Image (cartoon, grey):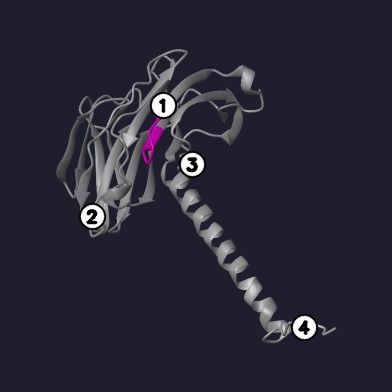
Amino acid sequence: MKEHTTKVRGSTKNILRQATLPLVMLSLALACLMGTRAASAEQEKAHVRVVHASSKTGPVDVFMDGKEVLKNFSFGNVSNYSNLPAGKHELKITPTGKGEKAAVLTATANVQPKGFYTIAATSSKNGDLGLKAFKDDNTGNKKEAKVRVYHFSPDLGAVNVTRDNKAIIKDLNFEQASDYVTVPAGNDKFEASSTNTDKKLPIQANIKDGKVYSVFVLGELKGKPALTYKVKTTDMESVEMRGSPTANATPHTKSTATATH
């Protein structure tokens, strides 16, 4: 009886290599698929930053959906943008170290995919606390720069802003943000002046193309902390990154937090 044998063509090493190749290709395909999904999920997120603009309040902790996201956050600080899934989120601000249940301000923020938002904790001349939300636009031509001014000084009154002695913003009221102003690159000198007094606040900014400059007017004209400013720089996004133009942050406590553009 003949014994039948089957010859295997190629070495064992080659066979293993041939068998492994489809597995490698499958792994690469899955990695690409997961990477695409992760990138897509990242693009659907919103971007939110927080400003401590309340001159009547000490350091605070900030909670988002029950999680502490900022600790010992003091007056005049502006956080970087943080990524959040689109939709509704609960924001709580508490005195530092007191815990979430001691919140002095609570708000619900409804943020849209790809949107950029600024949420500011403010205080009036009488010390009433509030939250104000703004829809930011960090898109544009990367061969130029943009400037926006946020007015958070409770007793300064309406302000005008000049650049090199030329008016670029007029009658900006407390808890408002200006339109975006396109400016050329350069070491510019801005000046915010009260329409009610002769008080002027010099503002220095080294403007570079492809950047968005947020100027926050903070503090008090007659009280403490004294009148000051903060400049925050953000890289300009391409137009495709533009988010929905709608946004709102509804507070559950004092004052209002209506989103504005």
Query: Circle 4 sits on which residue?
Result: 5
Up the image or down, 30 lies above or below 174; here it is below
N-terminal of the pair, mark 2 or mark 1, is: 1
Query: Circle 3 sits on which residue?
Result: 82
Say which residue appears at 29% left-offset and 49% top-offset.
Answer: 240
Residue type, label 1: Asn
CB under 8 Å between discs 4 and 3: no
Mark 4 → mark 3, Cα distance in angstroms? 67 Å
Mark 2 → mark 1, Cα distance in angstroms? 28 Å
N-terminal of the pair, mark 4 or mark 3, is: 4
| Nearer-the-camera pick, 226 or 132 | 132
Disc marking residue 141: 2
Looking at the rendering, in which quadrant would you find the C terminus? top left
- Would residue 20 appear left or right of 82 to someone viewing this image? right
**Mark 1 secondary-structure assignment:** strand
Q: In the image, which residues are magenta?
A: 110-118
Query: Circle 1 sits on which residue?
Result: 110
Residue type, label 3: Ser
Mark 3 → mark 1, Cα distance in angstroms? 15 Å
N-terminal of the pair, mark 2 or mark 3, is: 3
Is residue 34 visible in this depiction of the protein? yes
